[in-house]
Amino acid sequence: MTEHRLLLKRDDLIPTRIAGSVLAPAGGPDASAGFHRWLAELGRRSFTRAERIPLDALTGWHTDTATGDLRHDSGKFFTVEGLDIHMPEGPVTRWSQPIINQPEIGILGILVKEIDGVLHCLMQAKAEPGNCNGLQLSPTVQATRSNYTGVHLGKPVPYLEYFQDAVGHHILADVRQSEQGSWFQHKRNRNMVVEVTGDVELLDGFRWLTLGEIHRLFRIDNVVTMDARTVLSCLPFAAPGLIELYPPRIDRFRLALIRSCSQDEGSMYSPNDILSWITDSRTRRDVYTRRIPLNAVDSWHRSKEKISHERGLYFDVIGLDVRASGREVARWTQPAIMPHGVGVVALLVRVIGGVLHVLVHARAEPGFVDAVELAPTVQCIPDNFDPLPEAARPRFLDYVLRADPGQIRFDTELSEEGGRFYHARNRYLIIETDLDADAPDFRWMTLHQLVDLLRHSHYLNVQARSLVACLHSLSVG
Amino acid sequence: MTEHRLLLKRDDLIPTRIAGSVLAPAGGPDASAGFHRWLAELGRRSFTRAERIPLDALTGWHTDTATGDLRHDSGKFFTVEGLDIHMPEGPVTRWSQPIINQPEIGILGILVKEIDGVLHCLMQAKAEPGNCNGLQLSPTVQATRSNYTGVHLGKPVPYLEYFQDAVGHHILADVRQSEQGSWFQHKRNRNMVVEVTGDVELLDGFRWLTLGEIHRLFRIDNVVTMDARTVLSCLPFAAPGLIELYPPRIDRFRLALIRSCSQDEGSMYSPNDILSWITDSRTRRDVYTRRIPLNAVDSWHRSKEKISHERGLYFDVIGLDVRASGREVARWTQPAIMPHGVGVVALLVRVIGGVLHVLVHARAEPGFVDAVELAPTVQCIPDNFDPLPEAARPRFLDYVLRADPGQIRFDTELSEEGGRFYHARNRYLIIETDLDADAPDFRWMTLHQLVDLLRHSHYLNVQARSLVACLHSLSVG
């Protein structure tokens, strides 16, 4: 019998080391300018050009004659199908729509390493075909299963080996999380943060950044990608005692934000209350979905060009012809979802008893694995609600749109995933309020409660995870 | 703006109060005899008689002419359908089978109340049609959604109101958990423990018991039901410092068991390691299932009497004619699953560094919502493996069957749910070992790590939850 040494709370130091990376000095006045020069220089050397083409002009893809579904000839990647949705509790109780079915679980991974005593993240400048502005800051690795099983027949994905065989490395986060439940059927990716101690070769297009440096980039429109945001949100950054690491004089809002990272500071609801509320929401809410042929979707029409809603709302399914340098494959065509209008994704936050609380919404989306996930206070494309009755208008949307500039703590336009969505952009907002806004489908939660849930799958939707990363970015001055 | 008072760790006292109920004096030498007199007396006054009848003689049920599926005429309750399963990693890679589809989420609830300073559970003596021995000890409430929405057209379920509207009560546990993934397609129930402070009327057939009293009943064959076991397993009974509540001289095994309830005592793997291992198992393991017509299931045959496998293995689908007193409905017929043979459900446990660790198995079952859940070290009906190749024989099964009596810490035959299964019994075993048994699909975990996971859905399967309750019962002398 081997003698085993037991681990004593080995994970406990992680939040302190994360805070150290958030607070690390910026590396001279030129650090930010250096980053942007690097990004601009890369942008000149590489290119990804996506041209809209008719759906009928896609190559390697075909329309199933019986169902109208759009499929890749290999049967891999993803398909565009129909989904029939019944949500008896409304506001809209029944509809059907096109939806992307991509059952494979990909990997979104950030490699971290201590450099001069400070955790750094290995980030990649990557141009996805759907990006509105070329290169954005992405995780170390974004790999679909097709990527790493060779369906692409392309180049191997760099650094993937650290995530495919993480044994022996220090795992900071490893959890499967959902993606857009309005556009994806049961899509989820594995979000990983892995720490290495040995040497790591720095390849062209990659850069080591502290969390503080990444956080400052959150203030610039369309730089930090959705994939980077979701992985960053899964970092276990909450713990008691972090306040001692921060400078003694910080403003009221940041103080409340950092106190919100500690369960010792209290919360409006106990963890049991929150878990029970989620269980109740998931049990009570009926969401019935049924895959249907894409050509049986009601109120949507397919032309040679695209698939679109008869009233020009929601989104179109379009075709893209992509040419890229530095990718696994140099040229390909694919379908993509192009939303109509810029969305609003907003979190109301409130300092309660000196501790920041955020107002989350138990929201049903047709593509969720488990009916309901926690979403931001407001999440919609406002234009879509113009033709609907007043009762269907999302709660707090008008409050958010009319917020006083003094309440607005965060306001950046950020992009959704550029591999499947074309120019999908949302205005992400964090707005301080003193509203007593509790309602059955809404709850005030602290940041440490959200971080605890983020260790498990399918509690927070992708927009809420983005806003957790945005909130965390507000802890730097 | 209302001033809110924040909760400071209100849940923290629960484990201490649970330990108090475990350790409460037994209430005199007559306490146990009193319980058995009560159960016997109830057994004389009430009855549930289930007679086997041919499937063709079911009333209120019909066989769908196209698919062969067995359905209730109302479309409610459950259906028996076919499932086609593909698990490329084996040991058996492809098969089809009958399966019960019951998509409704029911409530399994235990009401608890402090009596003379000690938490008591309101337990019910209940005879399910499939029980092998009449009355067994059940939760306060077992209600399918059909029960509480009136499909049964029967009597209301007593005490249900405490669980349907738990606001204002103190919630100790509230989580949806899976049930037998070999016999149920995506079945799950809401497991709730709710504490009340006001008066509660004690109805005939119900009894207040301390956890210590319930734990002692775990030593008797077929008394504590599966539904009671799963709800009890969801109690948050682990916390640091519990050892101080126990008598100073307890034996080495119990000391290691109680230390296993505290994260301060250490563990072989960190929480992050465990979560990452689960994520990896769920991502790597491919489980493809597809509903098929019951009459298209391969190697199974339907007669007037029953549906059975051509080799007489696994289980039969049979008909039951049930007459019952004291139930919502006095007489009904239904299909049920009758397994062939008594199963073995065993947990290997090992004292590592003075802390008890249990060997859990990341197991795929076709009916799981999420492909893989944590299962006991061994879980099978041994007879089913006689015709299969040696390689298909479950790991550790022979070790368990040949264990020395001195290693056996728990050995009780317990019943599975008697509402859908007929005489489904398993021998539950907890066996101490000094094996170095780590393997890719197995991990040594502490009890507090399991209790942490049990606050969330779909981590532990129903057999593993039963064994967590059995393990907890070993903490009383």
Image (cartoon, coloured by chain):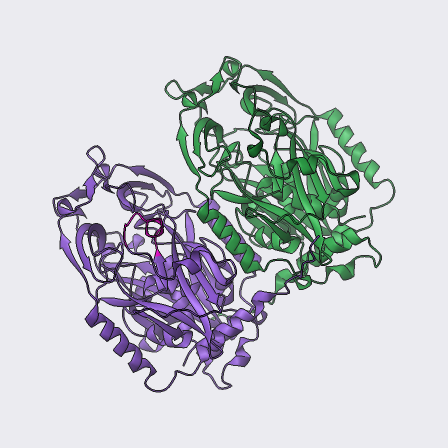
Chain colours: A green, B purple
Q: Quadrant of residue B162?
A: bottom left
Residue A72 on the magenta segment = no
The spot of residue A432 in percent (x, y) is 73, 46
Residue A254: in sight, yes or no?
Answer: yes
Q: Nearer the viewer, residue A149 or B299?
A: B299
What count of labels does the image hold? 0
Q: Nearer the viewer, residue A326 or B228?
A: B228
Task: Give the magenta part as a residue range.
Answer: B143-154
Residue A203: in sight, yes or no?
Answer: no
- The residue most toward the right is A29
Q: Quadrant of the C terminus of chain B?
A: bottom left
Q: Nearer the viewer, residue B231 or A178?
A: B231
Q: Quadrant of residue A323?
A: top right
The spot of residue B133 in percent (x, y) is 21, 67
- Residue A418 vs A258, above or below: the answer is above
The residue sitting at 29% across, 63% down in the picture is: B344
The residue sitting at 53% across, 69% down in the picture is: B14
Left or right: B456 as drawn, with respect to B207? right
The spot of residue B332 in percent (x, y) is 20, 52
The spot of residue B227 in percent (x, y) is 35, 61
- Residue A77 vs A253, above or below: the answer is above
The residue sitting at 37% across, 58% down in the picture is: B462
- Residue A19 vs A109, above or below: the answer is below
Residue B153 on the magenta segment = yes
Left or right: B193 as drawn, with respect to B44? right
- The residue most toward the top is A304
